[in-house]
Amino acid sequence: MQKIRKAIFPVAGLGTRFLPATKASPKEMMAVVDKPLVQYAVEEAIAAGVEEIYFVTSNAKRAIEDHFDKNYELEAKLEEKGKKRILSQVRNLVPSHVSIAYVRQHEALGLGHAVLCAKQLIGDEPFAILLADDLIDGGDQPCLKQMVDVYKQTGAGILAVQQVERSQTDQYGIVDVDSTHQIQKIVEKPKPEQAPSNLGVVGRYILPSKIFELLEKTQSGSGGEIQLTDAIAELIKTDPVIAHPFTGVRYDCGSKLGFLKANLEYGIKHPEFGDEWLAYLKARLCG
Ligand code: UTP
């Protein structure tokens, strides 16, 4: 069985749900407490064994490249001031065995199209996809690591899923599964009355490279975009794909409310000022 060594990070979306914040800044660079969303997702991928990271980016997302690049001036200043701890954090965002490369999606034609932009970089091996605006707190079992473990047992494609409100099925890819969690049906953003279940796909996938040839044949679907879900609907006709109901909490940080919730919760867990933040919240609610 091939190891999951490569991951695609599609970050070329327009982020319309988070305007005006995302007019000139990438939503993936928005910080939950003190780290940008994209860094949480990169750390999750590395914890799951990923060694090659490919961002599918656009002209509006240069800040992401800068974030993972060296900043000589900043490092020199921190060194001069003796700020060793923060210097080491800024310097070692990714360990030396991990490489990062970028490919452009010239037009936001959908998640499926974004994934297809990385086809040459992935080649003929199974790979992961992480959507950084889904922040998933899996505790000591990061979500992608859980999925890699299921992949190792089954060799199948794996999608992270969670129960969603019936009224919100039109915001997700919705799956129907059998008793072994194998996906029998997958539909992009069905209306609640047409949804085959309330199991929604969230932003973590492990897929075989066969998905690329299926994406090449996929016509634009929901929202006029080339949907990854539609290619997965073709994939399940020939290959097993398993829905993994991950352990952990997912914050939809592409939405304003989800982002606020993430900041509140990660603030409480922060080692430096979590207690003070919690005390503030308690006083604010009770005072
Ligand atoms: P979303 O559905 O969240 O779209 O994309 P979006 O444009 O980022 O945000 P909204 O809905 O307008 O607020 C899911 C993921 O797919 C990427 C996004 O960057 C996000 O990580 N994506 C989407 C692309 O890379 N390219 C696209 O054409 C569309």
Image (cartoon, rainbow, N blue to C red):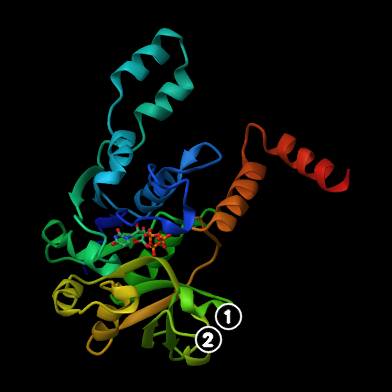
Residue at screen point 36% across, 53% down: 45
Amino acid type, mark 1 = Ser
Direction from residue 282 to residue 91 in the image, left or right: left
Residue at screen point 27% across, 57% down: 8
Residue 243 occupies which quadrant of the picture? bottom left
Residue 215 occupies which quadrant of the picture? bottom left
Q: Quick check: 97 above or below 53?
A: above
**Residue nearest the viewer, comparing 45 with 113:** 113
Task: Give the SS element for disc 2.
Answer: helix
The tag on residue 167 is 1
Direction from residue 186 to residue 283 in the image, left or right: right
Q: Quadrant of the N terminus?
A: bottom left
Q: Which residue is mark 2?
A: 192
Task: Give the SS element for disc 1.
Answer: helix
Q: Quick check: 149 above or below 80?
A: below
Residue at screen point 84% across, 41% down: 283
Q: Quick check: 131 above or below 33?
A: below
In terms of sequence position, does the residue under pointer 2 or pointer 1 come before the other? 1
Image x and y of residue 160, in percent: 43, 70
Q: Quick check: 35 above or below 5?
A: above
Image x and y of residue 259, in percent: 55, 52
Q: Are marks 2 and 1 in contact (CB under 8 Å)?
A: yes
Q: How many labels, in total?
A: 2
Amino acid type, mark 2 = Pro
Image x and y of residue 101, in percent: 20, 45
Residue at screen point 76% across, 43% down: 281
Disc 2 and disc 1: Cα gap in Å?
6 Å
